[in-house]
Image (spheres, rainbow, N blue to C red):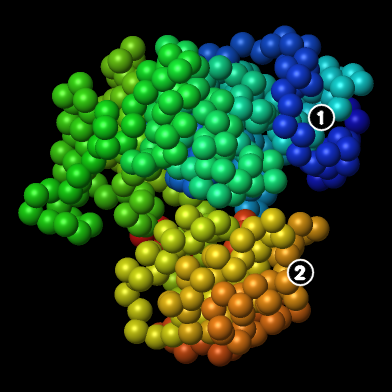
Amino acid sequence: MRWTTLAEWLAWQEGLHPQSIDLRLERLQAVWQRLGPPPLHGPVITVGGTNGKGSTVAYLDAMARAAGITTGVYSSPHLLRYNERIRINGQEARDQALCEAFARIDAARDEISLTYFEFGTLAALELFSRAQVELLLLEVGLGGRLDAVNLLDADIAVVTSIGRDHMTWLGEDLNQIAYEKAGIFRPERPAILGSREPPAHLREQAETIGAEVLQLGREFDWQLPASTSALDANGWHWQHRDGTELKHLPLPSLRGHVQLDNAATALCALHQLARHRPGWMQEPALRTGLSSATLSGRFQILPGAPRWVLDVAHNQDAARVLAANLHALESRGSLHLILAILADKEAGAIAGILNHLVDHWYLSEAPGARAMPLTTLTAEVTAATGAIPQSCQGLEAAFALAQSRARPGDTIVVTGSFTTVEAALRYHRARPGHLAPPMWA
């Protein structure tokens, strides 16, 4: 074995390939073939999209496991531990299992260079094969057509939403981005669109290749009971074009109106599987999964005074969802917002969306080499909001300053990137007795 610890393997992988992101599948396919390829024992659901894919995977995983189905989940990025990326039946992969998988991949690849993400993708599939998982849930890392998870032909492909993100690799035009996302669709297999108004090219592409298209608001939908227009104890209804209905479902465990779109999309995917596996659509299990799914860093509320809200929003659409959730949050105090973002993101647009809710801005640099410089971030936020933000040298300084200024009834929001939220979680973990179990709703 080349290395003995997970940290050594990951550090080596980060520098192995000349590009951190290399959107080609040829090298990956060659190594996969050299590995066997290992047999997979269950159907594959691949989930792509700009926002909402992590939530949709969380609902799929929770509902399937509640029905007794063994799941393998591959997602990215992680927040605190690399192991979070690969989960079998809800349990993170152990360091030793990851190291052994990496060693097998390293031996098989020979002279072929792989990226960090490609190593992880192959390790996930190899571990899922060994565990004989019954359902593989693969989250697209970037785009779709040339993303590593597209190595496999998805039995069901889901695209949750399409917005402006990763434009350097995917393009500026939404239809161009849709073309990349649609690359996970396959002929004669379900292509589920989890948005009511996706770019026209997404559905066109799915229909062109002969996929079975199911779109939110057309082939399936959700609605609130006629007696109410708000999210409350009356629950919600789900229906499919084939006449299937589920009534008075529990509200999704993750917060926000958009989660009904994500949960409905997950239900559609399971409904398609259940056509050939009737036991996979058990209503009690669906209810349990909807109300128990968890996902760190998505409007995650840390109880206490002042209250902290952590959200990985890093593009305009995600910022709109965050703003809606903050608007609905019961709070009588001031809102302190800590923003640190990556250099390729639209900081000014994000700040402009959130500005009407924010009383105090705190800016810093996100961890890592891809961070937007503090001077650039400050200039963009100031131009977009007219505010005079507090610039902080390091996120810990921003956390401490906001904590010292906030009153018990105030809310501190941390957003901008996964690494920003990771830093906030580590900050709280380092404060003995401060971090209580997270609130998901």
**Residue 294 position in % (x across, y down):** 44, 49
Helix, strand or loop at disc 2? loop
Looking at the rendered structure, the kind of residue marked 2 is Pro
Q: Position of residue 134 (x, y in %)?
A: 48, 20
Q: In this rendering, would 138 be left or right of 378?
A: left
Q: Which mark is residue 15?
A: none
Horizontal and vertical percent for residue 397? 70, 80
Quadrant housing residue 191: top left
Picture residue at 55% right of the left edge, 49% below the top: 164
- Count neighbours of disc 1 (C-alpha within 10 A) and say few if under 14, some if 14 to 19, many if 20 or more: many
Q: Is the residue under label 1 in contact with that under label 2 (CB below 8 Å)? A: no
| First reached walking from the N terminus: tag 2 or tag 1 | 1
- Quarter of the image for residue 23 reads top right
- The alpha-carbon separation of the residues under discs 2 and 1 comes to 29 Å
- The residue that disc 1 covers is 114
Camera-side residue of 431 and 158: 158
Q: Position of residue 299 (x, y in %)?
A: 46, 61
Residue that mark 2 sits on: 373
Left or right: where 45 falls relative to 261: right
Q: Quadrant of the N terminus?
A: top right
Identified by mark 1, the residue type is Leu
Q: Residue at x 65, y 73 (%)?
A: 380
Between marks 2 and 1 in the image, the one whose residue lies nearer the viewer: 2
Q: Secondary structure at mark 1?
A: loop
The residue that appears at 56% across and 43% down in the rendered structure is 173
Looking at the image, can residue 367 be seen? yes
Asked if 101 appears above or below 57 in the picture, the reply is above
**Neighbour class for label 2 at 10 Å: few (<14), some, many (≥20)?**
some
Decide if residue 138 is on the left or right side of residue 290. right
